[in-house]
Amino acid sequence: MKKIIAMILAGTMALSMMACAAPAAAPAAEPAAEAAPAAEETAEEAPEASGFTTVADGVLTMGTNAYFPPYEYYEGEEIVGIDAEIAAAVAEKLGLTLKIEDMEFDSIIIAVQTGKVDMGLAGMTVTEERKENVNFSDTYATGVQVVIVKEDSDIASVDDLADKMIGVQLGTTGDIYCTGDFGEDHVDKYNKGNDAVMALVSGKVDAVVIDNEPAKSYVAANEGLKILETEYVTEEYAAAINKDNTALLDAINGALAELKADGTLDAIIGKYISAE
Ligand code: ARG
């Protein structure tokens, strides 16, 4: 399966690289990059190290799955949340305008690989397997996989999940861990985290494994649910970037470092997550 995807990607990537071979000058970071003479020589070569290219000139296109509060969710028509604000701050540092594209969580890495988006930012956990397909930026937040159950459930810890039905969001680390630990037959996969929680409410599954912050908002929004105290797995979130675009990776890391140093990152996270 992985091989097939890799082959398809190799093909589409060659195409998309040809399509974006003309260097979009990196506005703020590298004003001198404009006069990149090497570009017309070989259309298939990766962008030169001095500047980064983006899918659309002057735009930082972010792929996300906007059903993951408080990292990304809809407020009316607008996608807001920690990731949306961090991305806007990064884009500003790079002299770009931010464009957010909402998609299935499962499609984000492929969108990064095939050059549909510049960066996946979706409370996405850094994993060794994903690293085979994308580069990850420096991490900007920590997540914990937790278990949501009904208040009167007999499930008291992760170990009690063995014979149960577990709801997860398709393609997330919750899905990967539960499928690995308890087997496909015990895992019900939903496109949105909220759909998994609805399945728990209606009794179709016995538990939901999901990241702690969205878990808190789902429990707050639905009566009769609780989060188990035992945590399942602790993880780090980072932005996913196309492996060929190391110049963009460097630029994003540079922007993130500045936002960390000047307190912007903490302020954004603090706005959505109250310290316990
Ligand atoms: N942290 C988990 C993962 O990387 C879940 C992320 C889900 N994010 C989302 N925007 N729906 O697999």
Image: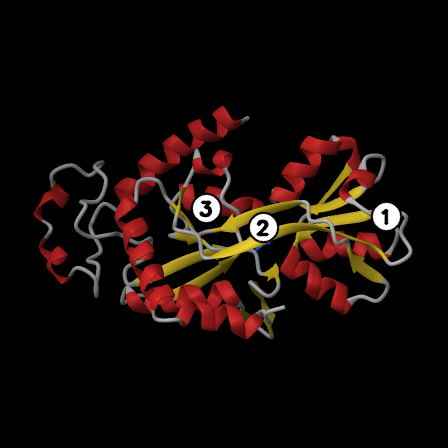
Tell me if 158 is positioned left or right of 101 in this view.
right
Of circles 2 and 1, the one toward us is 1
Looking at the rendered structure, the secondary structure element under dot 3 is helix
Tell me whether circle 1 and circle 3 mark residues in contact (CB < 8 Å): no
Give the CA separation, mark 1 to mark 3: 32 Å
Task: Name the image quarter holding the C terminus.
Answer: bottom right
Q: Residues within 10 Å of mark 1 (few under 14, many from 20)?
A: some
Residue 161 percent coordinates (x, y): 81, 40
Mark sitting earlier along the chain (2/1): 2
The percent position of residue 134, horizontal first and vertical second, equals 41, 40
Identify the residue shown where x is 20% and y is 49%: 22
What colour scheme has been applied to the protein in the rendered image? secondary structure
Element type where label 1 sits in the image: loop
Hey, what amino acid is under mark 3?
Answer: Ala
The amino acid sitting under disc 2 is Glu
Disc on the earlier residue, 1 or 3: 3
In the displayed structure, does residue 127 sit left or right of residue 159?
Answer: left
Residue flagged by tag 1: what amino acid is it?
Lys
Q: Is residue 30 visible?
A: yes
- Residue at x-position 57% and y-position 49%: 105
Check residue 104 in the rendering and tell me which mark sits there, or answer none: 2
Can you give x and y, in whole percent of width and height, for residue 254 in the image?
29, 58
Read off the residue under disc 3: 111
How busy is the neighbourhood of tag 3: few (under 14 within 10 Å), some, or many (20 plus)?
A: many
Residue of label 1: 204
Given residues 40 and 226, the one toward you in this image is: 226
- The total number of labels drawn is 3
Q: Residue at x 14, y 62 (%)?
A: 31
Side of 261 relative to 64 (left or right): left
Q: Nearer the viewer, residue 85 or 8?
A: 85
